Image (cartoon, coloured by chain):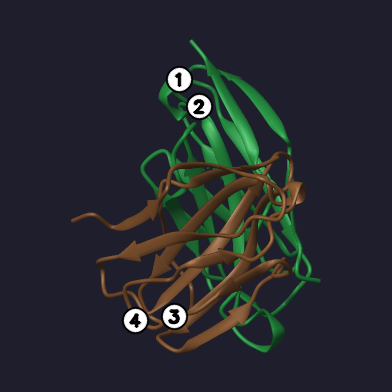
Chain colours: A green, B brown
Amino acid sequence: QQQVKQSPQSLIVQKGGISIINCAYENTAFDYFPWYQQFPGKGPALLIAIRPDVSEKKEGRFTISFNKSAKQFSLHIMDSQPGDSATYFCAARGGWGGATNKLIFGTGTLLAVQP
Amino acid sequence: NAGVTQTPKFQVLKTGQSMTLQCAQDMNHEYMSWYRQDPGMGLRLIHYSVGAGITDQGEVPNGYNVSRSTTEDFPLRLLSAAPSQTSVYFCASSYGTGGAEAFFGQGTRLTVV
């Protein structure tokens, strides 16, 4: 129940295309859903985050779509650029019970944007 | 502003050796945590702390010890290193006690031979 399942494992997108990464969870105690971006040799960095009381959040070319009933959320990268090539992690944090204060990560998606 | 600083960046240990991975943050964050990153497994939470003197276990705590004597520092101790602990270790800190909006260090690449 603590898992966050992420897909696909890897993704190749042409420059200017849309990159879509999906995550699913089971634990209804999760109350915060961030996405992190990681470049080789660096630590992950927070990209964008959403709470379950909204269905969508947009920041520039990055959008999170959240479906509470399906327990799924996704990251959309519009107009993908070669500089977006990185590993992306979804995560979820519990707000109560056994998941409290624990930020649980998905397994990551390696995105390559081809010029 | 240094953020989260981890030392060392690289380390090779022999099986059975002990060592401490250091983590320090200068943002006055209450919450600190340790993760390990392995290929295909994402980031897995080892231990975390919601404030000085308070620590708790994450998903994969076995073989690791932590303590939090100050707000700034959160060292991770490997008591008897095993090859299964070969990994990249990340320390993170967050404002407040909930663990949200984590700021990560640059990581420590540990190899146990």
Q: Nearer the viewer, residue A60 or A1?
A: A1
Q: CA distance from mark 3 to mark 2?
A: 36 Å
* For discs 3 and 1, the disc positioned in front in the rendered view: 3
Asked if the residues shown at circle 3 and circle 2 are in contact, with their CB atoms under 8 angstroms apart, the answer is: no
State the image coordinates of residue B47 (x, y, percent, origin top left): 59, 72
Look at 72% across and 77% down and name the residue there.
A28
Nearer mark to the viewer, of 4 and 2: 4
* Tag 2 subunit: A
Residue located beneath label 3 in the image: B68
Report crowding for label 1: few under 14, some 14 to 19, many 20 or more residues within 10 A (C-alpha): some
Pick the residue in front: B24 or A83.
B24
3 and 1 marks in contact (CB < 8 Å): no
Left or right side of B37 for A48 = left
Chain identity of mark 3? B
How far separated are the C-alphas under marks 4 and 2?
Answer: 38 Å
| Position of residue B102 measured from the top left corner of the image (x, y, whole percent) | 44, 63
Asked if residue A104 shows in the view, the reply is no
Q: How many residues crowd around disc 2 within 10 Å: few (fewer than 14), some, or many (20 or more)?
A: many
Query: Can residue B2 be seen at all in this image of the molecule?
Result: yes
Q: Which mark is residue B70?
A: 4
Tell me whether marks 3 and 1 sit on the same chain. Answer: no
Alpha-carbon distance for marks 3 and 1? Answer: 41 Å
Q: Secondary structure at mark 1?
A: helix
Give me the residue at 46% from left, 68% from top.
Answer: B75
Identify residue type, mark 4.
Thr
Q: Which mark is residue A82?
A: 1
Dot 2 amino acid type: Ser
Residue A5, how many percent across, how many down?
76, 53
CB atoms at circles 4 and 3 under 8 Å apart?
Answer: yes
Mark 1 and mark 2: span between their CA atoms? 6 Å
